[in-house]
Image (tube, grey):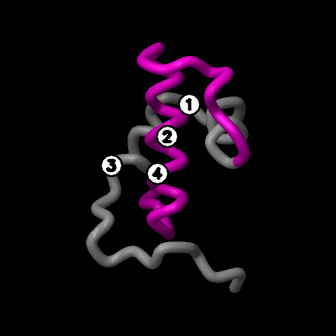
Amino acid sequence: MPAKSKAQQKAAGAALSAKRGETEVSDLKGASREMYDSMSETELDELASTTREDLPDRASDD
């Protein structure tokens, strides 16, 4: 599942970094912390690897 916004892609990248032990879990806040707790490394990798080029900064609430 690709990310729907640049913000979501960035949060997934931060959560993925913590899952891999590259950053401290205590450094995560908000969406990235929720993603860390609820998603697998594979799911986070899918979101984080989305190309940012055509993504909006933030997803709409539609």
Magenta range is 1-30
Q: Position of residue 36 (x, y in %)?
A: 63, 32
Seen from this angle, which residue lies furthest front?
27
Residue at far bottom of view? 62
Could you tell me residue 25's position as x and y percent? 62, 21
Residue pointed to by mark 3: 49
User: In front of the other: label 4 or label 3?
Assistant: 4
**Horizontal side of residue 46 vs 58, given as left or right:** left
Q: Amino acid at mark 1?
A: Ser
Q: What's the mark number on residue 43?
A: 2
**Which numbered disc covers residue 40?**
1
Residue 22 quadrant: top left
Per the image, label 1 sits on a secondary structure element best described as loop
Q: Earlier in the sequence, mark 4 or mark 2?
A: 4
* CA gap, disc 4 and disc 2: 14 Å
Above/below status of 47 relative to 6: above
Q: Which of pointers 3 and 2 indicates the residue nearer the eye? A: 3
Please report the residue visible at 68 percent of the width from the left and 48 percent of the height from the top: 31
Tag on residue 10?
4
Question: What is the distance, in whole Å, between disc 3 and disc 1 at their CAs?
Answer: 14 Å
